[in-house]
Image (cartoon, grey):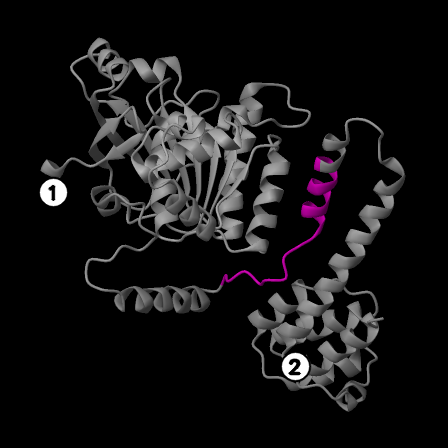
Amino acid sequence: MIDKKTIEEELIHRLLVYPQNSIAVSQIIKLVDFDFHAKAFETILNAFTSGKEVNHEMQKAGYKATSFFDINSYRSPEEIAKDLKELANSRNVKRILGEYINKIPETNLEKFIAELQVNLVNNVESTEKEKTSIKELIDEFMREREEYQLKPKGSILGVSCGYEKLDNIIDGLRPEHLWIVGGYTNMGKTFATLNIVANLVMQKKRVVIYSLEMSKNDVISRILGILTKQNGLAIMKGTQKNEIEKSLETLVDSNLSIITNKSELSQITFSMMEEDMKSPVDLFVVDFIQLVTLNNSKSEYETTTETALRFQQTAKKLKKPIMVVSQISNDGAKNQSDVVMSFKGSGAIAAAADLAIEIVHDEEDAKTFKEKIQAGEIVNMKWRVMKNRHGKVGYVSMEFEGNTGIFKEPLSDF
């Protein structure tokens, strides 16, 4: 069993003999919950921040600083502090599980598990020290800049979404970004998202889809339809067989995950962490935000507001892009001149988004659009980048094949 007192003394030893500045010491000590030597750490921190001699201050506080020099350790203070934080996390998990063990209900078990997951997430802190000093931030910025400069000329910052003109506007799918893909009913917003998923699958990227509306078979059939340029429903019925085996192998190799049994917000965000730990995820997709539920919520507004903000936080915490499908409100659908879309449920959806794209038709009128869709003809569409927190806005012309669900950029646009 690990002795926390011994590890605290090891950290004191390293802080006394290891060169540190006051900012570093402050960040290290703030990472740790002390049980045995809180006063000693407070004395060390005060000495560093005030510029006083540490050993002298330790002696004034009643410590014999030399006693800590006998410890044999060559680990960095940051490494030791992480061990102490892991110990604190372990104790918190044991405490929480102990509190819940006698509360396990015989019914409504999913709600109980969701509440337990939230409690665990809220009480288990990351051992990663957040970079806050301007020097650390600039060092990280320069490293990413150097990596980008090593890429071929014309490369984008993120992962390609499979559409050249769209990539040119948004610089691809970038870590920590929250995407909102919106559209009015039957505008093809789910198909638009699945086209991007299919493009990532072909790049051997890992995607995790949370489908709150469609079954797993429906999602797979639609993606197969896009990959094989066939009708997804016909594939499911077995009437289309060409290229199916090859595309199925592509899906398996991509490590795609489709999850349909989670709709409560905490279940989804906790699952995102689990999936990323299993195998690093390149993109999370949620279809769609208005179907996400929130325990003890009093209104749709409260649910969608909390959901949008939590997805934004989760994208930053996991350093992954999250793409969320959303409905457009009736007012937003009528007013096509809005700078930012009006999403159904809450204005927080648009506010939280790093990137907001609206799927709209580009036909003469709604009647023509509907007639072409029903006839199985190619329909002219636009993907309008209404908000881009980190770059340009604009639109990309698209052609939509209703029979296969494929969106493609017209050749005339290149």
Q: Residue sitting at 68 percent across and 82 percent down?
A: 14
- Report if residue 118 lies within the magenta region: yes
Horizontal side, residue 290 vs residue 407: left or right: right
- Between 85 and 164, the residue placed more toward the observer is 164
Q: Residue 51 at what x, y percent from top left?
A: 60, 78
Q: Quadrant of the N terminus?
A: bottom right
Q: Mark 1 is on which residue type?
A: Phe
**Residue extent of the magenta highlight:** 114-132
**Which image quadrant for residue 108?**
top right
- Mark 2 or mark 1: whose residue is earlier in sequence: 2
Q: Residue 175 at what x, y percent from top left?
A: 42, 51
Residue on which the image places disc 2: 75
Horizontal side, residue 72 vs residue 214: left or right: right
Query: Which numbered mark, 2 or 1, is in the foreground of this view?
Result: 1
Horizontal side, residue 388 vs residue 412: left or right: right
- Between 413 and 135, the residue placed more toward the observer is 413
Using the image, determine if residue 279 lies above or below residue 143: above
Q: Mark 2 is on which residue type?
A: Arg
